[in-house]
Image: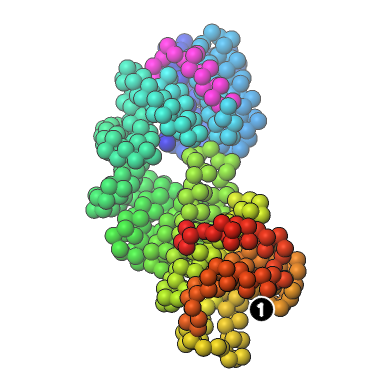
Amino acid sequence: MIVQDPGSFTNASAPARERCSSEILATAREHERSGRHAEAFREFQLAIESAEEENAGIVLTEALRRLAVLRHHRNERVVARDLCQRSYQVALAINESLLAAEAMNTMALLFFEAGEMESAREKFLAALELGSAREELRGRILQNLGILANVEGDWTAARDFYQQSLAAFVHAGDEGGCALAYHNLGMISSDRALWEEADGYYVKSHAIASALGDAHLQGLCLLNHSEVHLARQHFDRARDSAEAALQTFDRLNARLDKADAYKVLGMVYRETGRTSLAESRFRDAIGLAVESGSVLSEAEASRELALLFQAMGRNQDALRFLNTAHRLFGRLNARVDLVDVGGKVAQLEGTYLAVVRDWGQSIESADSYTFGHCERVANYGIAVASALGLEESEQTTIRLGAYLHDLGKVRVPHEILNKPGKLTVEEFEIVQKHPEWGLELLSAVEFPWDIKPIIRWHHERYDGTGYPDRLKGEEIPLGAQIICIVDVYDALTTTRSYRAAMSREEAVARMEESRHWWREDVYQAFVTNIVSDPISEGG
């Protein structure tokens, strides 16, 4: 979404005694629009001083408000709010309700960007009441209320506000406002997967932006439109639109927008099987995002690169970038410019599970005897964990650990894993190395969940007779204990190269003889929730 610029109020008919302060204000605004913020800062302060000397209330309220915005961008939030409040009070004192509305709208934006949503909403509504007589101002305030609703996940309210703002801009003859409203309506339509509707809005926004010479908005329309083309699998159009956006942002030296354009190009190339180009574009996006200090863009580009590596079977690289994205999204919990942080993190965690599950299944795929083992162990493990009252994050750790607990077996020779008879002492010693080998394969990968203890210690036993470290009792993490017991159960109840599958009753009898291998609460949870109420295979 594009947050509506707080706007400016000019007084073309200002009397001669205000001319000096008005000219200073105009100069300050020109510096601000050109990005010369240091010069603008100085000129706004000078305009305030001059307006106070001249008793020029209109100039004073506007200079105070614009200086508040610059102060806010310098993270001087308390000072910014004080300046904005003063602007509002000056406007009321001179009976200028529209200027008071401008000040209140700006104040609301300051609260919005600080994440204080209720205060922002309250002030936006107050500004709307004060500024209702001016359609252009009303349109901007409604636009901001729409953005607030969208950030909070209320798409219906957001769309309604955007449409109201569009009507206000049309009535005011404000083409720039219409372009922004169409753009934001396009984004909300995209969020709701209304691709045809989004397509129409972006076309309208781009046409107006082109007529007005607003290059930046043209670039944004092209970029966001390319994601619509991509979703509709119009890959050539998606690539062309993203390339055109990239060229626009390059001319404007808009590095952060270039990062987003590279990300979309990477997605296009990934979907069309051009993996080398896709990887290059994603890495370009990450580099520019880091340079620009955008945690959001870096997180999203890292996630997309991880999905590419997943498709290529580069599981370790995929998990490494998923972890980067997860860590970065975690830093955005307090950010207000990211819609639905929780939803993005949940989606990311779903991708984690998919990558880890696929990797676990790829390990088993060469062995018809053990195919499906990790999935069953994961399901059994979750049932035991749930019975023990473990929280959702702990259950996720159990599931991920189950998928990768036998990762190290890829280094065990095939003839040993599938030997039909009893293993020799030397062969069994090789098999016993697989927990350590699993950790070696994950040495360059960090996880948001502590799954490595499960991988290393899922063969440890409560009585100290397990491997590889002969841990005993409470030295063994609970997650490893859970995977250990359900791993044994699944091994006993499925056919292996060296024996037929046991019945459930036979397996339980065998495990009862060895119940000292596990904590008593783990064993009881297993018996109650797996044996007494068994989960169907693959369930």
Residues rendered magenta in the picture: 119-136
Q: Position of residue 281 (x, y in %)?
A: 38, 59
Instruction: Compare residues 344 and 535 and report the one nearer the observer.
Output: 535
Q: Is residue 80 visible?
A: yes
Question: What is the secondary structure assignment of the residue under circle 1?
Answer: loop
Q: Position of residue 447 (x, y in %)?
A: 57, 61
Residue that mark 1 sits on:
468
Q: Position of residue 289 (x, y in %)?
A: 48, 52
**The furthest residue to the front:** 505
Instruction: Compare residues 196 and 478 and report the one nearer the observer.
Output: 478
**Residue 360 vertical position relative to residue 52 in the rendered view, above or below:** below
The quadrant in which residue 479 appears is: bottom right
Crowdedness near tag 1: few (<14), some (14–19) or many (≥20) residues, C-alpha within 10 Å = some
Main SS, magenta region, reads helix
Q: Amino acid at mark 1?
A: Pro
Numbered label tally: 1
Q: Is 211 situated left or right of 250 in this image?
A: left
Instruction: Compare residues 46 and 387 and report the one nearer the observer.
Output: 387
**Residue 66 vertical position relative to residue 92 in the rendered view, above or below:** below
Q: How is the image coloured?
A: rainbow
Q: Is 477 situated left or right of 203 in this image?
A: right
* Residue 500 among magenta residues: no
Q: Is 155 situated left or right of 69 in this image?
A: left
Tell me what residue is drawn at x 44 percent, y 48 percent: 256
Q: Position of residue 202 (x, y in %)?
A: 30, 37
Tell me what residue is drawn at x 57 percent, y 17 percent: 88
Q: Is residue 280 visible?
A: no
